[in-house]
Image (cartoon, rainbow, N blue to C red):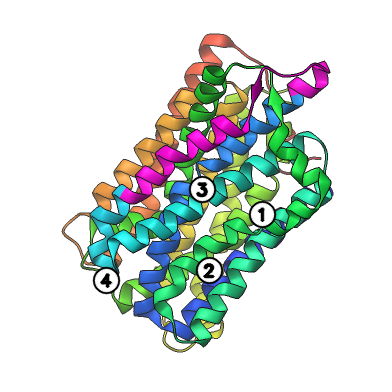
């Protein structure tokens, strides 16, 4: 498990480093374009996180039984890449005009990358089920490292037109690892469920993680869809600042996701009270973070990205507050999944995405709309999750306590 955490940390850090390098070398306007392409790939591709979870679950159950499964997983996994590739193509053809690139070429590049990403997450799921944590960490790190190197080479060679290919190519970092027997055996993994059962479960899991990814990784895409003419230098500065503010908090939060889930499932308090404790702790930390962002943030942004990225204390405070709300939404989503309320979890994320789009489209300046959306969208999702959690506790009386953020 430590290897898995290390791989997750390395992936998050390398992704953040990639964005910083692009921001410093390309400038705010070009960074805005890059951030949207990145958001298309990882906003849509974020659905594969749910596929990985389902693969891990089903392979673990099959191999625990010690019998030959009835379905070879590789077939359904390849089939599940089709809707993701189709969604990327749709998004690119709807939004590609704002990016100033060939929609067909962009769709082909990112679509091919998503096929690789689907195979990569399939492999990671099987490796996790078999306890091959060192190989899992190697695959995850190789994916992020290859992408970072490819992006830097494009920037150094002044080939910004190849950046979409650089983003997509990392998903094929697993190919050299086929020389390892344990990795080759992944393709032969079988499960007990029939083909239709595998597809149904995986699509539900992918829908949940995909909705969350659209709000977390796909925010620049939402900005582009709502305001296609706003992708200039000023928006590039705001998006770069948002990434700087969000990244540390979300990397830590997702890294400790198993700990949070374990705390929510431990015996003691009811689920709704447990979530409120986490929300209270995050709010307290958030107040401190907002104050620090307002005081030190402008200097940190200029130091990290360069003098071309100047953000005011107000902007940084608003973006930090929105990031705290998003962190709270992640926690409530985990809680609903722990309570087997997947539909309510997805509903909250969908509502948050819809509200975010509506706010972004308001008749305000692009910066004002973004600052409002990063707060209002997650708060709307929190309202849905809060109602669902309170109803769950009052109707079922289920006891699934929490150790709380401040306890072990």
Task: Examine the rendering and report whether any part of residue 110 can be seen.
Answer: yes
Report the disc number at residue 115: 3
Which segment is the magenta one? 61-89
Which one is nearer the viewer's eye here, 291 or 97? Answer: 97
Horizontal arrangement in the rendering, residue 327 relative to residue 240 (left or right): right
**What's the CA distance linking mark 4 and mark 2?**
25 Å
Q: Disc 4 designates what residue?
A: 100
Magenta segment: does it hold 82? yes
Callout 1 crowding tier (Cα within 10 Å): few <14, some 14–19, many ≥20: few
Percent across and percent down for residue 355 are 30, 43
Q: Are marks 3 and 2 in contact (CB under 8 Å)?
A: no
Mark toward the viewer: 3 or 2: 3
Magenta segment: does it hold 40? no
Horizontal arrangement in the rendering, residue 16 relative to residue 315 (left or right): right
Secondary element at image label 1: helix
Q: Disc 2 designates what residue?
A: 244
- The residue at the point 24 percent across, 47 percent down is 358
**What's the CA distance linking mark 3 and mark 2?**
29 Å
Percent across and percent down for residue 101 are 30, 69
Which one is nearer the viewer's eye here, 398 or 118? Answer: 118
Magenta stretch: dominant SS?
helix
Callout 3 crowding tier (Cα within 10 Å): few <14, some 14–19, many ≥20: many
The answer to which of marks 1 and 4 sits earlier in the sequence is: 4
Task: Examine the rendering and report whether any part of residue 301 can be seen.
Answer: no
The answer to which of marks 3 and 4 sits earlier in the sequence is: 4
The answer to which of marks 1 and 2 sits earlier in the sequence is: 2
Report the disc number at residue 252: 1
Secondary element at image label 3: helix
Residue furthest out toward the bottom: 307
The answer to which of marks 4 and 2 sits earlier in the sequence is: 4
Percent across and percent down for residue 42 are 48, 54
**What's the CA distance linking mark 1 and mark 4?**
35 Å
């Amino acid at each position: 498990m430590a290897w898995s955490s290390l791989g997750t940390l390395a992936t998050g850090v390398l992704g953040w480093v990639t964005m910083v390098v692009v921001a410093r070398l390309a400038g705010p306007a070009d960074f805005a374009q890059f951030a949207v392409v990145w958001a298309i790939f990882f906003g849509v591709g974020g659905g594969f996180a749910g596929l990985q979870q389902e693969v891990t679950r089903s392979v673990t159950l099959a191999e625990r039984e010690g019998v030959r499964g009835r379905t070879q997983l590789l077939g359904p996994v390849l089939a599940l890449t089709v809707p993701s590739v189709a969604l990327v193509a749709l998004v690119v053809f709807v939004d590609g005009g704002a990016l100033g690139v060939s929609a067909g070429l962009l769709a082909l590049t990112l679509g091919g990358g998503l096929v690789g990403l689907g195979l990569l997450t399939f492999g990671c799921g099987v490796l996790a089920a078999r306890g091959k944590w060192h190989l899992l960490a190697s695959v995850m790190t190789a994916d992020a490292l290859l992408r970072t190197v490819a992006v830097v080479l494009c920037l150094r060679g002044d080939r910004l037109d190849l950046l979409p290919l650089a983003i997509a190519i990392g998903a094929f970092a697993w190919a050299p690892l086929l020389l390892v027997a344990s990795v080759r055996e992944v393709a032969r993994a079988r499960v007990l469920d029939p083909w239709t059962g595998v597809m149904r479960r995986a699509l539900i899991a992918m829908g949940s993680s995909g909705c969350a990814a659209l709000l977390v990784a796909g925010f620049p895409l939402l900005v582009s869809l709502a305001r296609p003419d706003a992708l200039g230098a000023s928006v590039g500065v705001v998006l770069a600042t948002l990434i700087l503010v969000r990244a540390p908090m979300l990397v830590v939060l997702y890294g400790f996701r198993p700990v949070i889930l374990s705390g929510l499932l431990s015996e003691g308090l009811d689920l709704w009270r447990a979530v409120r404790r986490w929300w209270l702790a995050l709010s307290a930390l958030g107040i401190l973070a907002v104050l620090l962002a307002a005081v030190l943030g402008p200097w940190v942004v200029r130091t990290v990205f360069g003098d071309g990225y100047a953000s005011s204390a107000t902007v940084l405070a608003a973006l930090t507050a929105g990031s705290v709300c998003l962190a709270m939404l992640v926690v409530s989503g985990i809680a609903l999944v722990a309570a087997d309320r997947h539909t309510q979890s997805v509903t909250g994320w969908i509502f948050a995405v819809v509200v975010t789009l509506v706010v972004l489209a308001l008749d305000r300046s692009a910066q004002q709309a973004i600052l409002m959306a990063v707060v209002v969208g997650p708060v709307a999702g929190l309202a849905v999750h809060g109602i669902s959690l309170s109803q769950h506790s009052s109707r079922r009386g289920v006891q699934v306590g929490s150790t709380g953020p401040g306890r072990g």
